[in-house]
Amino acid sequence: MSAASQNLTSCCAGLYELPIVEYLLGQSFHPGGTKLTRQLATATLISPNSQVLDVACGNGTSAQVIAADFGASVTGCDYSAANTERATLASRAAGLDQKTHFIRANAEQLPFAAESFDIAHCECSLCLFENMESALQQLHRVLKPGGRIGISDFYLNEPVPASLDGLLGRVLCVAGALSADGYRQALTNAAFAYIRIRIVNWTLADMILRVRQRLELLATTNALTDTALLTDFGDPAPVLDALEKFIASGGAGYLIATARRS
Amino acid sequence: MTVKQRPYQYYDSTIPICSTCLQRVDAKIVFQDGCVWMLKRCPAHGAERVLMADDIAYYKLARETFIKTPEQVIAPNTPARYGCPYDCGICPDHEQHGCTLLIEVTDNCNLRCPTCYAGSGPERQTHRSLEQIERMLDRAVANEGEPSIIQISGGEPTVHPQFFEILKLARQRPIGHLLVNTNGIRIANEPGFAERLAEFAPGLEVYLQFDSFRPEVLKALRASDLRNTHTRAIERLNETGIHTTLVATIRRGLNDDEMGALIDYATQQPCVRGVTFQPVQAAGRLEGYESGYDRNRDRLTLTEIRRKILEQCPVFAPEDLIPVPCHPDHLAMAYALKLDSGLVPLTGLVDPEFLIDSGRATITYEAEPAVREHFLNLFSTHHSVDSQTDAMSEFLDKLERSPPQQLGYQNIFRVLIVEFIDAQGFDLRSIRKTCVHIVHPDGERVIPFDTYNLLYRDDLESQVLEPLRKREFAPLSGPISLARYRNSGSNST
C-alpha cells in the first residue's frame, strides 16, 4: 500500500494514545463499545472453552468483556506497547489475569503457531492495517480449521466527501474502509467461507451523540486546557454533521462480519 | 480495605426441586465463567450447583426478549393445592396451553431402548382400549378446543393392534395435525403399511426416531443396529410422500457430534421437513451408562446442543437458531428454505444482510413491531409445518423479498431443539411455561411432559408424588451462597 496509508496507520495509532481521544470516545474506542463486542462474540459463538485472539486489542476492554461474560481465554495483541501494558494492568485489577494475556505484536506478523485459536476478533482495526490482505492471511493461519473470524469496521460505499477529509475523519478511521462487498471479497480471497455481514449503524449514532455531548461539556466548562490539540481537530461540529449525513445517505456505515476458516 | 465480592454475578432467585428427594427447595440463578448456574440447597440432601446454560447471552435473550402473553387452556383440570409441581393436571397456575399433546396408546414396544423416558418395552403388554383412547382424545379436545397437534405415542404406537382405528378416531375430532411418534420398524418392514398411513395425509406427519448413522451409537441408545430400518423407512416415506420429521435423542459424548450430518441427510430426503434434537431427559429408563447415569457428567443443556449444531452446520449463523416464545428457554428453532442448492436460513433474514442489499436504514427485528409480530406468529409451535407455509410467505412478503421459486410446503425445513426439564434443571419459573403435554390415561388430566416423567407416570404418582404431598418442610440448613456444592454439569470448574 501507499506511503500515505502507512502514515495513516502510525498517525492513528498515535492518536489513540492521546487522553483527549479516550475522553471523546470512551473506554472502548470502537463504535458500539462493549455492547458490540458482546454482539460480535455471540455471532462468533465464543464459549467458555474458546481460545480467542483479539487483534489490535487496545487497552484490553474487549478482552476483559469476553473473558468475564463468555468465560473464554483471550490473547490480546496490539501494536502499541503502552496499550498492552495498560491492558495487562487493567486485567489484573479486574481479577481476569488468569483468562487474559496481552502481547505487543504486528497484525501482519502474528507471533503465534498455526491453528492456535478457535476464534479471532478484529474490532475496528482491519481498515487500519497497512496490508489488510496479509493481516487476513495471518488470521487464517492462526485459526484452527472451522475456526471463526469476527470483524467490526466501517464500510465505505462511496468516496469520502471533502468535508470529512480532516483529522477527525481519520480518527474515526473512515478513510481506509472497504465497501460492504469489499469485506466479503477480502474474506473470500483469504479463504474464509460462510461469510455473514450485519449492518450495525446504531453504533455510529451512539458514538456521534456521545462525542457531541462531551464536546459540549468541554465547551461549557472550559475543561480543555490544551487548546492546541483542539485546533488540530478543527471545529468538530461540521465534521460530525457531515458524517451523519453521509451515513444516512448510505455512503458509509458500520458493520460486523463473521466467517469461518475453511 | 478491599470489599468482599461474590465469585459470580447474581441474576435471579427461583424455586427448584432437590434432585434426590424432589422436594421443593430454594435456589439462586447466577452467572459465572460464562455459564448460567442454579445454586440450590435441600435441607436434607445438601447443596447442588447445576449447569443451566453455557451461553449467558442466549439465556438472557430467551428470558428477556422472547416474551409472549401466555395462551391458556379452556379450563384447568386440577386445583392448585400442594404447589407446583405437585398439582399437575393442568392446574390454574400453568402459564401455557398445550401446543403439542401426546396420547400414549400403549406401553408395549418392539424395542427395548436403554434410554426411554417412558420405560416401555416388549415385556409390557398393556395396550389401551379404544374406549380409553377416545376418552383421552376427548380430554385433549375439551382442554384445547381444537388441538393444533396431537402426537400419537407410546410405547410404540404402531404395534397397537387397532392402530389405524385410533387414527380414524382422532380424525373424527377437530384436531389440526396428527403426528405418529414411531421407531419406523413397521413402516420399514411391513409392505403396504406406509400406504395405509398415507391415506391419512395431508395432516398426518411421521415423527421418526433417528438418532445416528453409527451402529455403536444405535446399540447404546436403542440396543439395536437400526441403520437398515432407517434406510427402508425413509425409502417408504419418500415413496408415499408422508411428511416426516427426524427426531434424534442426543446423549453427551455419544452422538452430539452427528447433528450436522443428520441435518445434511435430512435435507436430501424429499419427505423430511426437519430435524428435532432432544437431549436425554433424566427420567424413566437410563441404562447403558458407564457406572450408571451421572448427572454431573451426562446432562446436556439446550445451549450446548445449539452451539454444537451451529458448529457442525455452518450454513446456520447464531441469529438463525432462536428461542420459541411459547417456552423460550427450552425450545429453540431455525427455519430454512430447502432448495436444490441446499438450505437457505430464514430466521436470520431480518438481520442486516438483507438490509445491505436493499440499502434501507438499519433495523433489528426486535425493534420493528410488525416484523416482530410476524415472527411470533411464525414461531409458535402450534403451527404444524403445513400451516407454516402461509406464515412464511407472509413473512417474506413483509420483507419485500419474493421467494426464490414457487414457495411450497416442500421447501420448508425446520430445526428444533427441545430440552425437557429434569429434576436437576427444574426451575419453577420455566416449568410453568411448558407446552408439550401428555394426556393422562385416566382421561381426566393433562400433564406437562416434563413433570409427567418425574412424578406422574405409572407408579410414580403413588410411590413418589404422594409422600411428597404429605411431607412437612424441614428447616433451612444455612445460606445458599455459602454452601458447599455438589457440581452438576460438565463445565463445572
Image (spheres, coloured by chain):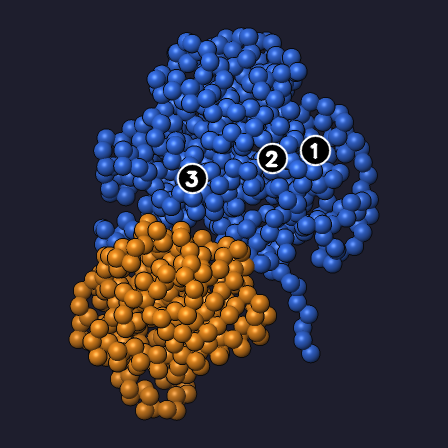
Q: Earlier in the sequence, mark 3 or mark 2?
A: 3
| Percent of width and height locating residue B81 | 72, 33
Circle on res. B122: none
Q: Is residue A27 visible?
A: no
Give neighbour class at mark 1: few <14, some 14-19, many 20+ (Cα, 10 Å): many
Give whichever of discs 2 and 1 has the lower sequence position.
1
- B470 lies left or right of A213: right
Helix or strand or loop: what does disc 1 sit on? loop
Q: What residue would you read off at disc 1?
A: B86
Quadrant assignment, res B119: top right
Q: Which chain is orange?
A: A
The disc labelled 3 sits on which kind of residue? Gly
Q: Quickly name the residue at label 3.
A: B260
Q: Label 1 marks which chain's residue?
A: B
Tell me if B446 is positioned left or right of A136 in this view: right
User: For mark 2, what is the residue?
Assistant: B281
Q: Quadrant of the C terminus of chain B?
A: bottom right
Q: Are marks 2 and 1 in contact (CB under 8 Å)?
A: no
Labels 1 and 3 within one chain:
yes
Q: Which residue lies at the image location 40% right of the left edge and 43% below the top edge?
A: B313
In the rendered structure, which disc, 1 or 3, sits on the residue that comes first in sequence? Answer: 1
In this rendering, the count of numbered labels is 3
Locate residue B55, reporting x and y percent.
Answer: 52, 52
- Chain for mark 3? B
